[in-house]
Every structure is written in C-alpha cells, then in structure tokens.
Image (cartoon, rainbow, N blue to C red):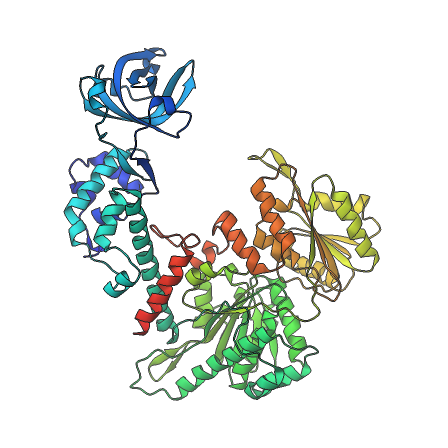
Amino acid sequence: MKIADIKNPVSTLSGAGPATVKALSNLNIFTIGDLLSFYPRDYEDRSHRVSLNQFELSKKIHTAAKVISHEYFGYGKMKTLKIIIRDETGSASLIAFNRSFLEKSLPVGSIISVTGTFAVKYNELQSSSFEAVMISPDGNLEDYKNTILPDSGIIPVYHLTAGITRKILTKLISSALKQYVIGIDSEVPEDIIKKRALLSKKDAIKKIHQPENLQDVTEARKTLIYEELYLFEKTMLKRAYTHKGALPGIDFKEDAKDERYEISDTQNDFSPKQAALLETLPFSLTKDQLAVICKMNEEIDRGYKERASLTQESTAPLFTMQRLLQGDVGSGKTLVALFASLRVIDWGGQAVFMAPTEILARQHAENIAQYTEKLGIRVAFLTGNVKAAGRKTLLKALKEGEINILIGTHAVFSRDVVYKDLQLAVIDEQHRFGVLQRQAIIEKGKQLFNNTYACPHLLMMSATPIPQTLALTVFGDLDISTIKTMPKGRKPVITYLVSEGHEQNAYNAVRQELDKGHQAYFVYPAIEESEDDSENESIKSAERAFTELSKNYFSNYKCALIHSKIEEEQQSRILDDFRYGKIQLLFATTVVEVGVDVPNATCMVIEQADRFGLSQLHQLRGRVGRGSSQGYCFLIYRKNITENGIERIKVLKETTDGFVIAEKDLKLRGPGEITGTIQSGDLQLEIADFSRDHEILLLAREDALKSFSN
C-alpha cells in the first residue's frame, strides 16, 4: 500500500473536531495518508535537561519545575496570567499571553516539564514562548530529579497554522501511524534499497515522525528524499520516452563530446546547405559548436529514417529531438540552431525560430538573413505588428512551402499560421515561454504517419547558464548540450566594483571609451524614481539618470533612453540607432538584458547592482565586449549593502564563467527565480530539495535510468 492509496478522511480520527479539520485543510491536508507525508521542517533536541540557570548558554531550557504561584497583571479583560515556577537551580516566570486556561491545567503545587526560551526582563527571569506538560498534580521536586521528562527526546517541529497546535498535530500523526504504517510499501525496488543502504518506507515514515535519536532522523530523511527524487526522475524519463521514443542524456563535461572535432572531420557529416554555410563563415566554429551540430545532425537524420521505415504494425513512439542548448552569452548558440535548421531544410522541411520579444526576433531575422542570403534560403519575419496585406502574402508562401525559415514572436503559432512541413522548432530564451506556448508551436508541425503521430524536433536555447541540479529537475526529460568554449578573439570583460559615492570614477572611464569612438550602456533597476519601503531609500531610475547625466556630464555625446514603457517600434528604432553608431550612450532598464548585439559597445555601468540577481548581472554584462575591443563593466553597489550582497557581486569580479556564477547564485539564494514558474510550474516536493540534495539526486537519476532501461 502506498501513502497515496490511503483515503480515510482525517475527520474520522479520534479527537479531530470541525475546527481541527478546518485548520488541517488550511495546511492542504485532507487524508490520513497526507498526514503521514506531512514531514517535519526541523527537530528539537530535548534528549538532555537544561536547567534555568543555563538560560544564557542554551537556546532553550528543558527542565522539571514546581508551580509556586499564579499571578495576574494588566486590567480588565486584558489581564495576563503569570505562572511562577522553580527548578533545582532557580526561579522564573511563565507569561501566559492569551492562555489563562493554564491556571487550571498547571495548578499551584504541580510538578511540570517546561521547555522554552528565557531572558531577564523586568528584573526577573521569564518566558512568554514556552510549552508545559503536567508530570504530577503535586509532590516534591526532588523526587523527579532523575525522572525522564514526558516530552523528552527528539521532537519534530512542523509548519503550523491558526487553529492547530503541535500537540494536536502530533496526536493526529501518532494515530495515523498506529493505523496505517504497517501496511505501507516501499516504492523503491528492494535491490536499490540494499544498494543505497536505505530503510524500508514504513520504517522511514515512523522514524521521521517519532525518532528515538538524531541517527534515526538522518536515515529516515535520506530514505524519503531518495524515494521522492527517484520517483520524480522515473516520471521524467517516462515522459521523455513517450514524447520522443528515447531516454534523455545530459553532458556537463568541459567539452560537449570527448572527440575533438575539427573542420576537416565534420565536412563529410554536413548536408549540402550546411557545408555551403560553413564555407561562407569568416571564422571557425568552436569545438563545442561542432560537437553539438554533429549530435543534432544524428538525431534529425534518425527522426527522418524512423518515419521512412514506419509500418502500420509499429507501436513504438517515433523519435524526435528534444534538446536544451545552453551556453554563455556570446557563445554562438543561434548559429548552431541555424545549422540544425539547414539540416531539416535539406530534408525538405521547414524551421521556425520563436523569440520572446520583437526586438530579439528582429535581430535573429537580420543575422540569419545575412548568413543565408547566398544559400537560396527564404527567411520571413512575423510578429503581431506585421500589416494585414503583408501578412496574407507571407502566410500563403509559408503554407505552400516557399518559406524555409520563419522567425518571430508568439505570432508564429497563431491560429491562421499554417506550415507546409514544419520539422524544427527553435525557442530562444526558453524561460520566457510557458509550457502551453511551447506545446502550441509543436502542434503546428504534428503529422500523422501510418496511424502514428510525429512531432517536429524541438531545440530550446538558454543564455542563462543552468546549474546541473536544476537542469536534472526542470529539464530532466530533455537532452542537454552545453557550449562552453567562446569564439576566438573574444576577450573576457573586466569588472570593477564601485561603492556608491564614487561613481565619478566609473563615469570618467566611460568618457575615455566614448572618446575612443566606442559606445556604452547605463543600466538602472527602475524606470521612474520610487521609494523602497522595506529599506527606506530611493531606487535609482533610468529616466532621472538620463535627464541629469545627459545634460550635466555627458552633454557632448549623443544619448538616448530606452525602457519597457516605450512602444516596441520606437524601442527598435532606438536600438537600431545605437547599433549603427547614431547613439553613443544608452540609458536603459533591463530591456537590454538579451538580444542586443553591438560589437562597438565596450562599457556598461550598472547602478545599484546589488538589487539584481547574479545571473541577471551576468546577462547584462554580456552586452559589452562582443567585438575585438576590451569590454568593461562597473557594478555600483549601495553603501548599506549586506555581507551576503558583497559576497554575491564579488563573484562577478572574480569570474566571467556563467556556469560558475549560476552555481554560486544557487547556493547563495536558493533556486528562486533561476528557473521561474513560467517554464516549469511549481515543483511541489514534500521533503527533498533540489539544490541541497544534489548528490542524492544524481544517484536517484542513475538508478532510475538503469531500472527504466531494464
């Protein structure tokens, strides 16, 4: 029996009245089975007594005491009960706010067990945060000197809500354990339990809620974390096989493959249009680019061959490439995607590039058109702003197969968009799109072969380096390729940390670069001036900085302002002017984070940099140094920056490796928005933590792969 199979409502438990059931509903607990998987968030070690005289040395007192007297202070209905107690080392007061009922449950003369935090206030030792359990209604304290206190041991600490106490929840869980724990089966195969030295599921459930010592906690947590991650990975693998007829692979080696690909080695593997593009490039592809291209060629060819050999008796899913291509800013992912597009075009298919903004989509269209203008490839650009007449002509050409590559925004999967033979969907900045949006573009290319549906190949690209742990979870059903090697001649950006108040140094450096004929960005956390209520200080804005600096400090230079409130068409004009050198200094918000490629831009100043995430800062920094000249980035941080904040931005100064930065960001602030709920949904885990339990996750995935293959 699995926990999920236990359907008895919690209201049938002894002592669980309507108020308790309502409180449990607030905790999203509806069945006894859910109670057993409502794991403690922490544990309190009460295995040893801690006397009152040790209040300065210990976080909590845990002692046997005698109730000496009851007192009240305050007026009228606001009176508060004070319980005077004494243990073998001294006296203290328990301040029972809103707990006047304790006058009866802890009568004068009784012997009680007390646990709580104590401090000296109003010339006496007292606690308002305490728990007390009756040991005896009367007696001598000396008689209980060596007695084991009733609430001793390792005590689970649960997340609670209004209307339910730890005592009530513990009672309910204890009842559930007595009724059902014996019948709970392990969901991990027995051979893996032995191999990984795990407990049985029933023993782990019992020990996680009722541990006898800390070793029980460690063993139970390891077992339950492993099981949750193992089942998660099996689900991801099953989904991968269902979608593409193959299991995923993830390669985090320094090189994408062990082989060192050279141009001469790969030319024979390239299709005609791929080879033609390779001949026109004024530079050499990096070994990582070549490795990924060759791997995708194999997968695209496999998909076509399986379709060609498909018979009506076949029941296996047709293979389709489903790959995440991640690489640092400027590593050449778009060019790799173009090679994949040319592969399907040589097979007679079409490709689509989908970008989250019109600016980024337009830039892709311009760059790809330049690469393909001599290859006889027809490239089209489609967004919601394309006029009706032009749109009608474009859609007709697309449906008839006259367009080989379509590039655009969400418009590329609009209802009236029909492809003749869509075989590859490329999604750039994949974290900006939801699951339903990705599925919508896949549906545009879905075709029926001998009663079996085949989907187009999917290539998702991310310029935000994803730590291995998150890749294994959020993208566990995808093959993942990584481009780490950068194009030859690209110099690492030099980063300087500047304390607020010393901005002049950064401004002077920017002026020197502008005088050399280069361009620069100034980036701000807000469009308009605003107040941060939590920190009681102003947030610097792009609008105010543009007004002040363009007039007072950079008046001799051509300046412009860009942010998300400006219409997209005007944003495109501003970026075009910046790209072609009509604008020297661009004041902006994070709209320039992706898709802005200006090789002549060598400087970036980011104000109040400690307000940004590390990955975002790295993305912004990637806008400079994209040409042959040295790039510089100045991170101006606030005076009241925390130690954690300093540690975070120091990472940017120490390395330009986006994967190192992403791992550090994950450790410093947790998963947070690195993945974002837009792309992955809210991953609801009961006890495991993807970043904390990284090593267990790798073991669980290894075992899941083996068991699935068998």
Q: Residue at x 37, y 78 (%)?
A: 453
Front-most of residues 212 and 684? 212
Front-most of residues 140 and 654? 140
Image coords of residue 125 (percent x, y): 38, 18
Q: Is residue 624 above or below residue 168?
A: below
Q: Quadrant of the N terminus?
A: bottom left
- Is 576 left, or right, of 122 in this rendering? right
Image coords of residue 290 (percent x, y): 58, 77
Image coords of residue 7 (percent x, y): 19, 51
**In the rendered image, is residue 164 in sight?**
no
Q: Residue at x 63, y 71 (%)?
A: 365
| Count of marks overlaid on the render | 0
When asked about the image quadrant of residue 190, the answer is bottom left
- Is 266 left, or right, of 588 in this rendering? left
Q: Residue at x 66, y 47 (%)?
A: 524
Front-most of residues 211 and 231? 211
Q: Is residue 650 above or below residue 426?
A: above
Front-most of residues 618 and 49? 49
Q: Quadrant of the C terminus?
A: bottom left
**In the rendered image, is residue 78 in sight?**
yes
When asked about the image quadrant of residue 515, the answer is bottom right
Image coords of residue 690 (percent x, y): 41, 55
